[in-house]
Image (tube, rainbow, N blue to C red):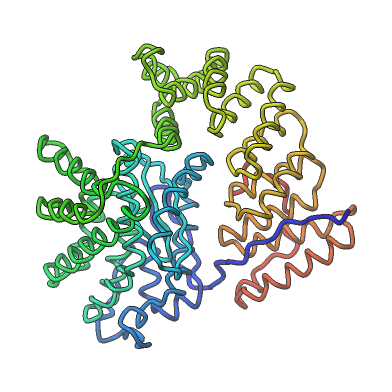
């Protein structure tokens, strides 16, 4: 039987434009793609990803925006947006704040995909992700990257409200508000525009609200009122487009206005409380709420019930936010078990898992699965608990039955792979994960998981190869080549692997600058460390 190999990533961060990025964790170097640098100009790009480092003495007349056709494309084409979005997303992933919970990630992408399907815009390939941040906020990045804070998921009272926020953010992307904002400010210094967008990125990555507001004020200068008016226009347009997509996707069209109203009331009733982050980045007025409600009346009323997946995602967020397992258990034990819904019982079982109370969790998961076998999270929860209780045979039976029902389901396969590694069945885990990742594009963390599986299965060459792909996915071309060169030194390397790795190195080098090629240390020792590589 011919050997199957992991299909590599094709997107790299390979330029030589560098920016010093100040953050809470220190100073680091960010490398930018030369195409983006040429399109947006060096000063603009550097400040954009630096998130407000400093302003040079260049004025509006010193740097000219390129004129390439339509107003939006004149400064940022859709292809440029996609590349810029990928670079910003890599930077956010490096921050370690992206929630790597497959169940939550799959759910938020399912909701987003339902909405995107109604937008009739094929220019973007959307990616939805969750940021570990208790503040109530959501944001859109260039190229179709939509981030939702854990605090916002918890704050929503229904799935319709969550879908309303996501629909609003999707509309910001499809209507190209970032490119249009740059064009609207084209008469101002491009440095000021870069600072304005840098402030948006600071907010997206969880930066200080005060820093964001201050940066916006400085960047806008004497054109503050014009910028506010333009921002309001964007917000109203995003509401209009978003409500239409919301209704067409089968959600309650009032969901967006409902969430806006709740957030606005939260501040009005408690003036001493700090306004939710969502209101700071998405100003909400009574007029805007009223208009959203009026627009919703144009669509048929929808009586929708929250999906089980919504409840499970919220439950996992709630359990994770407590500082100690004891607090999470106490939260779910406040109400009698018999009066709780299945979703609440699920949260209770997850809290028991976190607290190491596996026997209590076992009874709940068994009951939940008996009641509804269509919920993948119940299968996963039961399998995890059985492994923790040292009952591997029954655990493997649970996972195998679940795979029969939900083949190649991402959260299920990833969790099964991790349990197999716990049980010392690395070869099976490697084979199963490889099949998944050759059919579903993986995240960097998922590639690290398959590298671990290959390493523990004794497939050292493949482990190096996966680690190389991981480094490429986070924009480290030099590190990616380093792992491939280490693989080429292995005495057990097969000829077909040697050919594949050498071809991969040649391919990556095409994306590297002369400076990178000269600086690359060909003989740098690299060890397999799939748990700590970053």
Q: Nearer the viewer, residue 132 or 358?
A: 358
> Which residue: 71% across, 26% down?
397
Q: Residue 370's quadrant in the figure?
A: top right
Asked if residue 467 lies left or right of residue 242, the reply is right
Vertical position of residue 189 compared to residue 265: above or below: below
* Mark count: 0
Asked if residue 334 lies left or right of residue 130, the reply is left
Q: Residue 481's quadrant in the figure?
A: bottom right
> Which residue: 49% across, 21% down?
349
Vertical position of residue 270 compared to residue 447: above or below: above
> Which residue: 41% across, 77% down?
77
Asked if residue 272 lies left or right of residue 400, the reply is left
Q: Which of 243 and 189 is in front in this view?
A: 243
Which percent across, then down, holds residue 375?
A: 53, 33
Which percent across, then down, holds residue 477?
A: 62, 64
Which percent across, then down, holds residue 351?
A: 46, 22
Which percent across, then down, holds residue 245?
A: 33, 57
> Which residue: 44% across, 64% down?
85
Q: Which of 143 and 123 is in front in this view?
A: 123
Asked if residue 29 lies left or right of residue 458, the reply is left
Vertical position of residue 238 compared to residue 365: above or below: below
Vertical position of residue 250 compared to residue 318: above or below: below
Q: Residue 157's quadrant in the figure?
A: top left
């Amino acid at each position: 039987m011919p050997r199957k190999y992991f299909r590599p990533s094709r997107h790299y961060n390979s330029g030589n434009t560098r920016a010093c990025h100040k953050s809470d964790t220190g100073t680091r170097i960010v490398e930018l793609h030369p195409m983006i640098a040429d399109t947006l100009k060096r000063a603009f790009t550097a400040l954009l990803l630096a998130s407000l480092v400093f302003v040079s003495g260049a004025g509006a007349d010193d740097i000219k925006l390129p004129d390439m056709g339509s107003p939006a494309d004149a400064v940022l084409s859709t292809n440029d947006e996609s590349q810029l979005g990928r670079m910003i997303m890599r930077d956010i992933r490096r921050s370690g704040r992206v929630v790597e919970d497959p169940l939550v990630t799959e759910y938020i992408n399912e909701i987003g995909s339902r909405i995107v399907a109604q937008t009739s815009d094929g220019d973007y390939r959307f990616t939805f992700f969750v940021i570990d941040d208790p503040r109530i906020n959501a944001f859109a990045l260039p190229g179709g990257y939509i981030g939702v804070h854990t605090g916002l998921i918890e704050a929503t009272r229904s799935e319709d409200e969550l879908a309303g926020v996501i629909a609003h953010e999707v509309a910001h992307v499809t209507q190209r508000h970032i490119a249009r904002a740059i064009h609207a400010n084209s008469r101002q210094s491009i440095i000021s525009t870069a600072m304005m967008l840098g402030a948006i990125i600071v907010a997206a990555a969880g930066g200080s609200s005060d820093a964001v507001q201050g940066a916006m004020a400085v960047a806008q200068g004497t054109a503050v009122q014009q910028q506010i008016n333009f921002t309001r226009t964007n917000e109203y347009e995003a509401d209009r487009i978003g409500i239409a997509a919301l209704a067409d996707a089968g959600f309650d069209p009032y969901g967006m206005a409902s969430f806006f109203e709740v957030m606005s009331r939260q501040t009005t009733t408690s003036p001493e409380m700090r306004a939710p982050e969502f209101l700071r980045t998405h100003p909400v007025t009574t007029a805007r709420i009223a208009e959203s409600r009026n627009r919703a009346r144009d669509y048929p009323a929808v009586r929708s019930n929250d999906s089980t997946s919504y409840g499970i995602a919220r439950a996992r967020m709630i359990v994770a936010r407590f500082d100690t397992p004891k607090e999470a258990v106490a939260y779910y034990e406040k109400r009698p078990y018999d009066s709780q819904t299945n979703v609440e019982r699920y949260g209770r079982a997850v809290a028991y898992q976190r607290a190491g109370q596996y026997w209590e969790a076992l009874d709940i998961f068994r009951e939940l699965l008996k009641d509804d076998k269509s919920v993948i999270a119940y299968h996963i929860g039961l399998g995890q608990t059985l492994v923790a209780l040292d009952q591997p045979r029954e655990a493997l039976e649970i996972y195998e039955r679940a795979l029969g029902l939900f083949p190649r389901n991402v959260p299920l396969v990833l969790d099964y792979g991790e349990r197999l590694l716990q049980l010392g069945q690395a070869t099976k885990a490697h084979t199963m994960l490889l099949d998944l990742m050759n059919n579903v594009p993986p995240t960097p963390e998922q590639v690290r998981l398959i590298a671990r599986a290959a390493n523990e299965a004794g497939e050292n060459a493949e482990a190096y190869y996966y680690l190389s792909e991981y480094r490429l996915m986070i924009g480290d071309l030099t590190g990616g080549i380093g792992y491939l060169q280490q693989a080429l030194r292995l005495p057990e390397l097969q000829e077909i692997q040697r050919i594949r790795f050498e071809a991969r190195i040649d391919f990556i080098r095409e994306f590297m600058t002369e400076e990178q090629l000269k600086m690359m240390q060909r003989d740098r020792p690299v060890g397999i460390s799939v748990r700590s590589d970053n």
